[in-house]
Image (cartoon, rainbow, N blue to C red):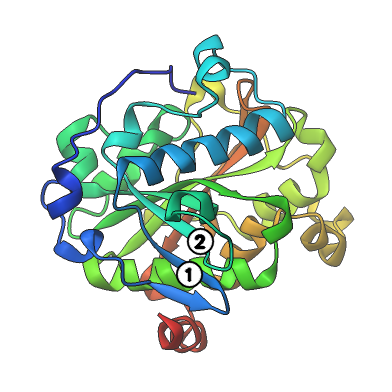
Amino acid sequence: MMNHVTFAFDTNRFETGHAGLAPMTATLMPLGKIGSLEARLATSEAEIEAAQKLRFSVFYEELGATRQTAHRLDQRDADRFDSICDHLLVFDTALPGPSANQIVGCYRLLRQETADATGGFYSADEFEFNTLVARHPTLNFLELGRSCVLPAYRSKRTIELLWQAIWAYVKHHGIDVMAGCASFHGTIPAAHAEALSFLAHHCTGEGDWAVRAVAERFAPMDLMPAEAINAKAALAAMPPLVKGYLRLGAKFGEGCVIDHDFGTTDVFVVLPVSAISERYITYYGGGA
């Protein structure tokens, strides 16, 4: 999607957080904790570099992303957005060594005020995200992306921990809407025909919440008629992240985008905080 850009970190920002960011980002206090796993925001350049290496390990070495040579040379997945985003990290505190060696998962968070000041949202390259935001001038958006967890930690427990931490972040910053890309592995939408068709027929945002893939990258998702879909099979075929969004009440954009660099088929997720069931707010809020 986005070209690799070399950037320099301002080490001073880890003392006070990003521009405009509350001191929450500079603390080591976990935003969520389950057993030996803790989730908090990155507080050092070393932790962000470790997250980039983790992303490289999963996206490039495991899943076969084929972007630029520069990524392979420094063994990091990095772009210009890393220097402006908050990085939510999952640590296994039972592992030895410094905190950077304990990172087993990551998520990248970009708040609307930062995106507005620095050139927009990452997902706008694939979906008409800016149109959606403009339609809701009184709401505060948060883009979530670059979700990545090591194979040994891909469990319900890790997903629940991430949602604990995201909920704490959402409440702290007064976020009204969470949005961003989620991915199906592979570049052939037909391989996910039932799951994509289920989203297209039953989970597409409407009215003010409608959003489309950009015209030049639009690929249809309604690959099967609604009556031919086995809902149980479709849900079972969803990536865990997509299933998690569905449980919380998310809607999806119209059309998907094939990302040949990452070898994925991307869908757009829209989750207004007001749509989240009270039982999930109680569940995740209680542990955050």
> Disc 2 marks which amino acid?
Phe
Is any atom of residue 17 visible in this view?
no
* SS at circle 2: strand
Task: Residue 150: give x, y in percent of width and height.
Answer: 66, 50
- Tell me how many marks there are: 2
Q: Out of 204 and 238, give the one closest to the viewer.
A: 238
- 147 w.r.t. 258: above or below: below
Q: Quadrant of the C terminus?
A: bottom left
Residue 16 marker: none
Left or right of 114, for residue 265: right
- 26 w.r.t. 54: above or below: below
Is any atom of residue 221 visible in this view?
yes
Q: Out of 244 and 276, give the one closest to the viewer.
A: 244
Q: Are marks 2 and 1 in contact (CB under 8 Å)?
A: yes
Q: Place residue 129 in its image quadrant.
A: top left
> Disc 1 marks which amino acid?
Glu
Q: Earlier in the sequence, mark 2 or mark 1?
A: 1
Left or right of 253, for residue 22: left
Q: Residue at x 45, y 49 (%)?
A: 100
Task: Residue 164: give x, y in percent of width and height.
Answer: 46, 74
Residue designated by label 2: 91
Q: Residue at x 38, y 34 (%)?
A: 122
* SS at circle 1: strand
Task: Residue 11: give x, y in percent of width and height.
Answer: 19, 39
Residue designated by label 1: 38
Marks 2 and 1 sit apart, C-alpha to C-alpha, by: 5 Å
Q: Place residue 131 in its image quadrant.
A: top left
Q: Out of 13 and 200, give the one closest to the viewer.
A: 13
